[in-house]
């Protein structure tokens, strides 16, 4: 099996003096971060929905949205999500098959929202191990990721490295092969702390959406949907008022994961 090796990293150069920039107040928009997932090799999974509002650029607190009505239409039933924590809604034990289509419906205040998606398969995440390399500053943590691509052409993947570290990749240059690449955590990544790393299937639309969103939002605390730096439209429609579209995305994915633990060197 052919092995392809590449290195990924982000270098940000800082300025010397902070500048207080007055930014206009952001439009208050609903953010719907919704994922129906199953683990690799399984046939059932979980719906996770996080509802929040956009914040101004410098706000650190993300306002969560409670008391919404969230439901999932499957081929066999309509399932109602429970709010397990403020702004966090779940449905457990959902049957997820390759040919199924799922419709997410929400009611927030006086507006209704809807999106439909189908399962996108993943591939096994072979391993994630700590490396010895760093970037220019010398205080990053290298995670060496190895995965084996599905043999079909046109596969897209989203990787979640934890702590709002997201990365998208496509198999244009490694179709059907094994690939290894390096991802660099910043110096604040906790040592000796087991961290799940997820590999998820993505379709082309979601891949493109996340590629743009990550580039707009950067890897900030609160995740790419947290602040109003980007008003990128996802696949969720406001069925009450199409002009008042929400932010966020509904996806149905298969995923694999491994535990990565960085040690002090």
Image (cartoon, helix red, strand yellow):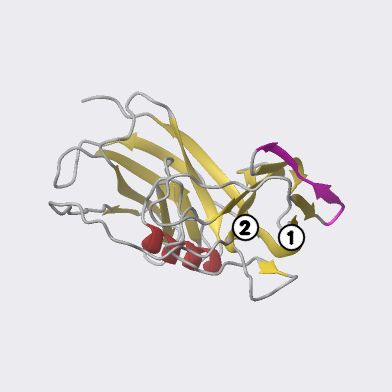
Q: Residue at x 15, y 40 (%)?
A: 138
Residue 12 percent location from the top left of the image: 22, 54
Residue 82 within the magenta-colored segment of the rendering? yes
| Numbered disc 2: secondary structure | strand
Residue 78 within the magenta-colored segment of the rendering? yes
Residue 96 percent location from the top left of the image: 73, 50
Q: Single out the residue that lies furthest toward the bottom.
A: 243
Q: In which quarter of the image is the C terminus?
A: top left
Q: Is residue 171 visible?
A: no
Please report the bounds of the magenta region as a residue range: 75-85
Give me the disc on residue 99. 1
Residue 127 percent location from the top left of the image: 41, 38
Q: Which residue is drawn at 63% across and 53% down?
A: 34
Q: Is residue 152 visible?
A: yes
Q: Work out whether residue 223 or residue 3 is closer to the camera in this orientation and state it.
A: 223
How many circles with numbers are drawn on the protein? 2
Which of the 4 image quadrants contains residue 205?
bottom right
**Considering only order in the chain, which callout, 2 or 1, is on the residue closer to the N terminus?**
1
Residue 68 percent location from the top left of the image: 73, 50
Q: Single out the residue that lies furthest toward the right.
A: 76
Left or right of 83 in this view: 60: left
Q: Nearer the viewer, mark 1 or mark 2?
A: 2
| Numbered disc 1: secondary structure | loop
Identify the residue position indicated by label 2 in the image.
251
Q: Work out whether residue 236 or residue 44 is closer to the camera in this orientation and state it.
A: 236
């Amino acid at each position: 099996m052919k092995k392809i090796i590449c290195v990924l990293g982000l270098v940000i150069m800082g300025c010397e003096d902070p500048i207080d920039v007055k930014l206009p107040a952001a439009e208050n928009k609903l953010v719907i971060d919704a994922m129906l997932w199953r683990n690799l090799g399984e046939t059932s999974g979980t719906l996770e929905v996080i509802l929040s509002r956009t914040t101004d650029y410098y706000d650190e607190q993300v306002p969560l949205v409670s008391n919404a009505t969230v439901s999932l239409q499957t081929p066999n039933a309509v399932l109602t999500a429970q709010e397990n924590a403020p702004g966090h809604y779940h449905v457990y034990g959902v049957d997820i098959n390759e040919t199924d289509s799922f419709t997410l419906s929400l009611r927030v205040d006086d507006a209704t929202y809807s999106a439909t998606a189908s399962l996108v398969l993943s591939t096994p995440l072979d391993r994630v191990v700590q490396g010895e390399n760093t970037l220019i500053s010398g205080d990053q943590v290298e995670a060496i990721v190895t995965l084996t691509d599905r043999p079909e052409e046109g596969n897209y993947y989203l990787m979640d490295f934890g702590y709002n570290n997201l990365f998208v990749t496509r198999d244009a240059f490694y179709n059907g092969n094994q690939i290894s690449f390096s991802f660099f955590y910043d110096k604040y990544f906790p040592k000796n702390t087991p961290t799940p790393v997820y590999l998820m299937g993505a379709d082309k639309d979601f891949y493109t959406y996340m590629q743009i969103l990550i580039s707009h939002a950067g890897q900030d605390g609160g995740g790419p949907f947290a602040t109003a730096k980007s008003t990128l439209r996802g696949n969720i429609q406001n069925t009450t008022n199409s002009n008042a579209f929400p932010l966020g995305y509904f996806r149905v994915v298969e995923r694999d994961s491994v535990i990565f633990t960085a040690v002090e060197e």
